[in-house]
Amino acid sequence: MAMWQGAMDNRGFQQGSFNSFQSSSSDEDLMDIPGTAMDFSMRDDVPPLDGEIEEDKSYNGGGIGSSNRMMDFLEEPIPGVGTYDDFNTIDWVREKSRDRDRHREITNKSKESTWALIHSVSDAFSGWLLMLLIGLLSGSLAGLIDISAHWMTDLKEGICTGGIWFNHEHCCWNSQHVTFEDRDKCPEWNSWSQLIISTNEGAFAYIVNYFMYVLWALLFAFLAVSLVKVFAPYACGSGIPEIKTILSGFIIRGYLGKWTLIIKTITLVLAVSSGLSLGKEGPLVHVACCCGNILCHCFNKYRKNEAKRREVLSAAAAAGVSVAFGAPIGGVLFSLEEVSYYFPLKTLWRSFFAALVAAFTLRSINPFGNSRLVLFYVEFHTPWHLFELVPFILLGIFGGLWGALFIRTNIAWCRKRKTTQLGKYPVIEVLVVTAITAILAFPNEYTRMSTSELISELFNDCGLLDSSKLCDYENRFNTSKAGELPDRPAGVGVYSAMWQLALTLILKIVITIFTFGMKIPSGLFIPSMAVGAIAGRLLGVGMEQLAYYHHDWAIFNSWCSQGADCITPGLYAMVGAAACLGGVTRMTVSLVVIMFELTGGLEYIVPLMAAAMTSKWVADALGREGIYDAHIRLNGYPFLEAKEEFAHKTLAMDVMKPRRNDPLLTVLTQDSMTVEDVETIISETTYSGFPVVVSRESQRLVGFVLRRDLIISIENARKKQDGVVSTSVIYFTEHSPPMPPYTPPTLKLRNILDLSPFTVTDLTPMEIVVDIFRKLGLRQCLVTHNGHSTRFRGEAKSNETLLCPQEAYSVIGKLRTQQTGQMLRKRCAQNMLFPGGGHSYYWLVGSGKVFWKRDI
């Protein structure tokens, strides 16, 4: 099947509404769908046979059966035809058909010469080479971001006199005057109070350090938001909602461009270093996809085909998660489960390869300095007991409640930002939130440290050499026979840490709501994990003390004797982190895999699975959308969710009711309209495309032509074809009749006509129509009535046409929530007349408007 070219001119984006359907499927998903039919009935406008055309050269027909090809191609393609406008959707069917034609041509030519064979081999290998480059570039940028963010975070507290490029940890590693117990205190590391007033003791020194901490935080945040605002507005946020939309087929020019990559990389370091409650993991997915999109321009195979490019972006997203968490397998599953809309098997293999290369590159750079790929390596010595599934499930319930609460409050705040004056002052908003965060964070050591360091400490299982307050137990040096630390009474440091962690939990819960969505790069993975890790550690310490003081209870005496090492608080922190992250994002399989790759805790998969599933069930009971889907809906992106079911029993003809006073349906005839007529239609309407019919009397469908292709083709003809004027007749037929002398040259545009637009009958159930858009990735679908007299309701007058410019996506969105048929009728006018009089009518759903043509 040949492909049709063109692009929708979707003006709905500027108006804040989207109305495009897009989906994706593999080639194997092209299936016969019950309830669909083409209208092949030919009454008075039956085209003659080929032999009759040879005998009668004056025939200018060209109905549906006039060609077995979708469209004709020019020997020299018109520049611009077949491309897409910004804020538009691609046509998956056409793009995949184009790639099949390209591959077939290369395969056929490979048999003709050695050079063509080499070209064929290089074309097949280009995908793997591209994955290699994406992995190398993504891993290198991730290592640079990790090292820079760690250094700049420590810069808020002091500087290394032995080498300004060293962060606090590396500075003291190189020191010859430090003990293991005081490994964070070395003479080479000087706080700002030591540099300014030559002392680190006293209230004034504390105030100086406090002031410098807040000042550096404000400076980093100001630079981040200013760079985003001036150079790359698309560099803000996590980028995952937009990437999901782009992978579903939508086009946002510049979102994955070079300026976005440069500014996102720089500002991500600044935003993380400012101490705001955000992470770099989500934005790293955006960075990796920018790398993939830029590198695609080096290969014609991917530069000229939007569907193939999205396969690359799916693999790049996997590489982004791989370098964000050191989890290559989890990255592939994340791309498959969370962001990708079209994920064929070959993309799975290439995603795995890209994630592998990215992880290897990051490991070679070794940004964490521990010679490990994982971000939070844990080493728990105690196996979990079956009874502990109860507190693990409780953590899952907490994670689901927190996820639902966060999504509702964050969306409400983001909606307020978009609809009030607050959205006009992004710099002030960022500075205010940064100031509040820094002022409240400095007095508490657990909020002052970076969120990644906090999670690492919460995951940690206390050992003999740990100096953290979380490990300040009484009798801490009494070990069991195996050398492990037994359960023991908590000391003063543990109780102090519990209070500080409780305050940290409250601050993180509240401040993250206002931070996510600001005009700076901001990820949500690490803040969500921090909330869950704090809650899990608190519960874990509580369970540990309960088992110590009440080991004779029935729930403990069978498996936990006094003095034994029964409870591991760090495991509870890990399970809590997974629960809260799952409650916010609604991930399941990929979440569990990321968590055990992130920590190395392979034997704790069952607790992680129990917590992840519980959090998802609880969160889904309170709201069906994850945070990324909620932001997609908030921003009005045209995303047709593949996971949602269409629950309403609605027919295709019920979705769109025409309004009584709407103008006639705008159609083009195949051989009777002039250039001036078409240009007038283009200037007076904003529709993205037009049905082409045999004649206004017949209204028999010939095909469909796109607005953009019409504009480009007419402009090109005026420039390159002599004699084309406003009175030149446009033909969409295969054969044009002989013209009288001295008439202007005709303009043949059959090459831009889609001769086989996808059609369904008016009685097709809407769930099938929606499934068609999902499975085939269509941009529009024509709904036809078979030309027989059918009077549904009311009276229909001859030559009366109604148009309802209702966005299809909005209707589908309403139908799948709470819109009923009665409410739909109110939306597009009540008491409407339905087609009658014995002629066909057409209804077009697509990236542009929805048209209803009746009884012309």
Image (tube, grey):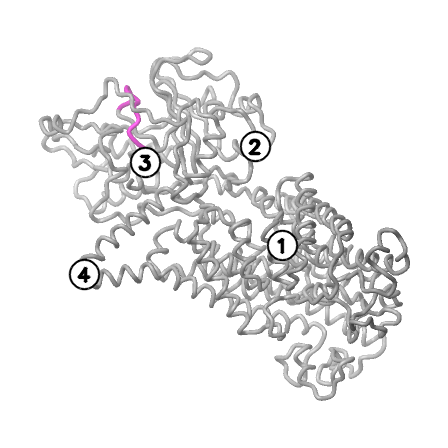
Q: Which picture quadrant has residue 684?
A: top left
Q: Is residue 838 above or below residue 111?
A: above
Q: How many angstroms separate mark 1 from mark 4 (CA)?
A: 51 Å
Q: Earlier in the sequence, mark 4 or mark 2?
A: 4
Quick check: can you spot residue 514? Answer: no
Quadrant in which the N terminus is drawn: top left
Q: How many angstroms separate mark 3 from mark 2 (CA)?
A: 30 Å
Query: Which residue position is annotated with label 1?
Result: 592
Q: Amino acid at mark 3?
A: Val
Query: Which residue position is annotated with label 3?
Result: 705
- 661, 243: nearer the viewer: 243
Q: Amino acid at mark 4?
A: Ser
Query: Which residue position is annotated with label 2?
Result: 816
Residue at 72 percent of width and 67 percent of height: 449
- The magenta segment is 695-704
Q: Amino acid at mark 1?
A: Val
Q: Earlier in the sequence, mark 3 or mark 2?
A: 3
